[in-house]
Amino acid sequence: MRRALNLILVLLFLLSISYINIEPAKANDGVWISLGSNYLYSEVRTIAIDKADANIIYIGTWEEGIFKTTNGGESWKPINNGLTDTYIHSIKIDPQNANIIYVGTGNGVYKSTDAGESWNEVGSLGVEVLSLAIDPINTKIIYAGTDTVGMSKSIDRGEKWERLRILANEIPSIEVDNNGTIYVGTELGVSKSQDGGKTFKTISNPKGIEALAIDPIVKNTIYAATLDGIYKSNDEATSWKRIGLDGVPSFSIVIDPKNPKVICWYVGRGNIQIN
């Protein structure tokens, strides 16, 4: 039990890391995780944990695709059947059906309906997809942020996509709250939509957004990891206050879903700050 708890805590930390080396464990050499008897060296870009079963974990790597464990990390297996691109930026599990998973890759969005055993490209976006978000209430609605052509929306689980009008071309982060409000992080700041993406309002401060995280318990609260530190808003992104790492580039952020006072963010390879 204690080992399982420790694993969950470690994975919460790993969720805030953009780049992790995967090899046998080494002391005093960054953050490392073991893949059992077979090892690879790769960059982990994204991690997703099944909310119903924390022993089921997916990691998306740079070049080597997706790996899955069903026993809390004791063993891992590659699950790339059907993927034609193994550069993985984002993994999102449908909050209402854990068998449905979406991944953002270097050439579009792929979907699995069998918990990762097979993948099919959906929608033929044909561009690099940096970020994904699923509406937590209506999981047919998916948002995809790209590296060059802004943001798209699907209302049929990715089968068809509609381009949304938003000022930025590169979209590194998207979050959707329980009211359907969309928050988009870009170099220009945070853009917000309350009409399903028809219109966006951009809050210019802070700029250089790398990642967003919605507080799972405290209403109207959202955090931003930026190139100038960590910011917090208590009023649905209307106003912001810097709460840490003044002037330090921060690339990812995660909130413990059971204890929102515990916030972790990644500020460099193997460097995790905890508040």
Image (cartoon, helix red, strand yellow):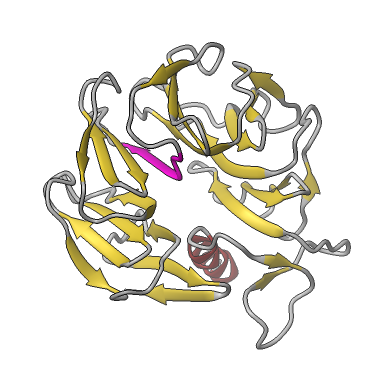
Picture residue at 31% right of the left edge, 56% below the top: 224
Question: In the image, residue 91 lies at what x, y percent?
Answer: 57, 40
In the picture, measured across the screen, residue 212 lies left or right of residue 129, that is left
Question: In the image, residue 125 lies at what x, y percent?
Answer: 59, 21
Q: Is residue 81 above or below residue 173?
A: above
Quarter of the image where the C terminus is located? bottom left
Picture residue at 64% right of the left edge, 22% below the top: 113
**Magenta span covers which residues?**
170-176
Picture residue at 69% right of the left edge, 51% below the top: 61
Q: Is residue 230 above or below residue 197?
A: below
Question: In the image, residue 141 lies at what x, y percent?
Answer: 41, 20
Q: Nearer the viewer, residue 200 or 121?
A: 200
Q: Quadrant of residue 194?
A: top left
Q: Nearer the viewer, residue 4 or 174?
A: 174
Q: Is residue 11 above or below residue 178?
A: below
Q: Is residue 175 magenta?
A: yes
Q: Nearer the viewer, residue 84 or 3?
A: 84
In the picture, measured across the screen, residue 210 lies left or right of residue 48, that is left
